[in-house]
Amino acid sequence: MTTTHPTPQPPNRITPSSPAPSASAPPSPYRITPARVLRSEWHKLRSLRSTWITVISAIVVVLGVGLIMGGTYTSGGGDSDVDTVVLTLYGSMLGQLCLIVLGTLMTAGEYATGMIRSSLTAVPARLPVLWAKAAVFAASVFTVMFATTLVTFAGAQAFLHDTDQAASFTDPGVLRALAGNAGALTLMGLLALGLGALLRSVPGAIGAFIGGVMILPEILGMLPYDVVERAIMYFPTQAAGALGSATPIEGTISPGPALLALSLWAGTTLTAAALMLNRRDV
């Protein structure tokens, strides 16, 4: 008897003409959401040593100068006509520099270290990264600086309670000016953050801020034209000064237009940075 063995069959192979197996991959549990992008930027912000250095420096400068102004003030002196909130928050002009550096480092600093490639690889849409940076910066800085202005004002008033600069939180315009000061510092920092994202260079962004925002208005102010003088009132530094005063300051606009002008400066810079982020390679 002859035994026949079955002919071995070759293994199944997928040829170009063969249909692919219909196995659907399970959906990934990890999705890019605004909340997760915000959380990522918050972790990056608080984990950097530069964040703590700049924020603590801003707090120390604002609080320290405010206490010095309160402790050394005498009634009838040269500062008797200065707004009380402005007097106690003189240190904001120096604290602003610290926050400008922080805003620049949040964006341009990532280009300097190359971290921006990882950020944009994780979020290919790109723009959510920029908006998350701006939101985290704004929320963090405003909260910290508003608390700092409240403590500074209360500490300075402990020295000023028996002088002609005595005031309280319930006086007209005081709380608005304290919040306006914190808001102005936040918006100036956002302007620097936008410049950092636009120029992608820490020295370049800081130089552009100092030259264009702080020095240029002083140069333009030397021109003997009323229209130039009126336009300078809407520049960032001048608008920020109007926000931090409880009483109207001669030669400045009112707080409402000042807030709008400063918001437009910061918003325009961030919008330009967003357009460049979409069009330029990293």
Image (spheres, grey):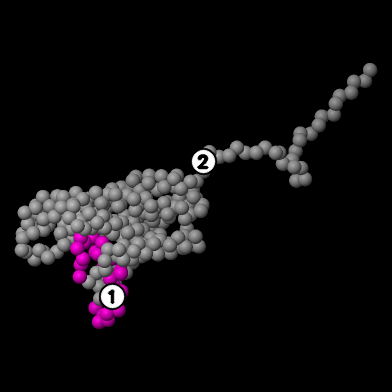
Residue found at the far bottom of this picture = 224
- Looking at the image, residue 194 sits to the left or right of residue 120; the answer is left
Magenta stretch contains residue 85:
no
Q: Residue at x 46, y 53 (%)?
A: 128
Type of the residue with mark 2: Tyr
Given residues 271 and 200, the one toward you in this image is: 271
Given residues 99 and 111, the one toward you in this image is: 99
Identify the element where label 1 is drawn.
helix
Camera-nearest label, 1 or 2: 1
Q: Which residue is mark 2?
A: 30
* Horizontal and vertical percent position of residue 31: 51, 43
Q: Mark 1 packing: few (<14 Cα in 10 Å), some, or many (20+)?
A: some
Q: Which residue is mark 1?
A: 230
* Horizontal and vertical percent position of residue 149: 21, 52
Q: Residue at x 20, y 67 (%)?
A: 249
* Horizontal and vertical percent position of residue 89: 19, 57
- Looking at the image, residue 252 sits to the left or right of residue 33; the answer is left
Type of the residue with mark 1: Arg
Residue found at the far right of this picture = 1
Task: Please tell me which of labels 1 and 2 falls first in the chain.
Answer: 2
Identify the element where label 2 is drawn.
loop
Q: Is residue 130 visible?
A: yes
Q: Is residue 94 visible?
A: no
Residue found at the far top of this picture = 1
Q: Residue at x 37, y 46 (%)?
A: 42
Magenta stretch contains residue 226:
yes
Q: Which mark is residue 96?
A: none
The residue segment tinted magenta is: 222-250
Q: Is residue 256 above or below residue 22?
A: below
